[in-house]
Image: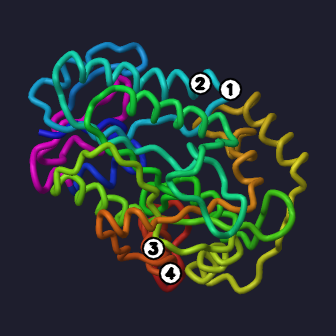
Amino acid sequence: MHLVTGATGFIGKNLVPILAAERPIRILARRTSDLSFYRKQRGVEIAYADMEAGRGIEEALKGIEVVIHVAGRTMGRNRYDFYRSNVLGTKNLVSAMQKTGVGRLLFISSHAACGASPSRLGISEDIKPNPVSDYGWSKLQAETVVVRSGIPHIILRPSSVYGPYEMEILKYVRLVNRGICPQTGFGEKYLNLVYVRDLIGIIQKILIDNRFDNRIYFASDGRSYAFSEIIAAIARQLGKKRLLKLPVPLPLSLMYGILNDALIPEKKRVISRDKVREMAQKYWLCSNERMVRELGFRPSYDLEKGMTETVAWYRSNGFIPLEKNHR
């Protein structure tokens, strides 16, 4: 049996039903988590634990062969918030695995752990990490915990992941739907993407091949997208032909992020100072060459196909209004 952390998050909600269709899956959750998504999900067993406090993890690991560690905080007010969730939580998980003898770990990290690229060439896994945000720093520290654990592992560093249940791109979709296109700073920016179903395909391949040889892989669809290209793809799905472009100077963006951190609860926060630091970078680009070469990865989704499915999911679930001809 496999154990999945972070099952109530964006990636987890896409991953667990697919894995559970193949074999029973146990998910790790707090007792305060909203588990309504899994109440009628077959093949899913719920284990309650608190990773930050280190409570209940060893019990949840009984009978487990592989841990897929997806859980992580993406929004926080300060470095300690990220440390507590992403680093300490991973330390407690790894410690429990060592005590119980669970011998394989697939850790979903982030491109942010390595930082932005200095050019459009994109960075490889061999470059010295230089995270620009507290989130990225915490993910890098968590990677170090995994590497030093001695547990056979794979670390995936996805680029920007999008798809059903993703709430960050939804913010842009809603703005574009109102005819607005904001951007932090001036000038074009570039980034890689990976559709969530392709990321799950990579995870499935690693599990099927039982490949836990302590490697790190960037995960993307291999394309470099201009930010304007992504916005244009969203606009096509929404039928918006004209957009009001609003470049926001970096100091103003940072101030807005600080105010969000100080005054707005996490679940309602539009943006944070930490996220502004990431958005200010010109090139969020990496090479997926190692993944293609060693894992045989071939993406099934490009931007147009992925955004079509994503916007359709937002519509069908009431996050954006249905088009008149869809009503």
At mark 3, the secondary structure is helix
Instruction: Find out whether residue 297 is within the magenta segment.
Output: no
Residue 267 spot, x, y in % from top left: 58, 37
What is the tally of numbered marks visible in this picture? 4
* Residue that mark 1 sits on: 78
The quarter of the picture where residue 232 lies is bottom right
Q: Provide the residue span drawn in magenta.
A: 19-45
Q: Which mark is residue 81?
A: 2
Residue 106's place in the image compared with 326, above or below, is: above
Labelled pair 2, 1 in contact (Cβ < 8 Å): yes
Between the C-alphas of marks 3 and 4, the distance is 6 Å
- Amino acid type at circle 3 is Gly
Residue pointed to by mark 3:
306
Q: Residues within 10 Å of mark 3 (few under 14, many from 20)?
A: many
Q: Can you give x and y, in whole percent of width and height, for residue 216 in the image?
A: 41, 49
User: What amino acid is found at the position of numbered circle 2 in the picture?
Assistant: Asp
**Which element type, helix, strand or loop, lies under badge 2?**
helix
Amino acid type at mark 4: Glu
Instruction: Provide the secondary structure element on which disc 1 rests.
Output: loop
Crowd class of label 2 (few under 14; some 14 to 19; many from 20; radius 10 Å): some
Alpha carbon separation for disc pair 2 and 1: 6 Å
Vertical placement of residue 280 versus 47, above or below: below
Q: Is residue 149 left or right of residue 82?
A: left
Residue 255, horizontal then vertical, whole percent: 86, 40
Identified by mark 1, the residue type is Asn
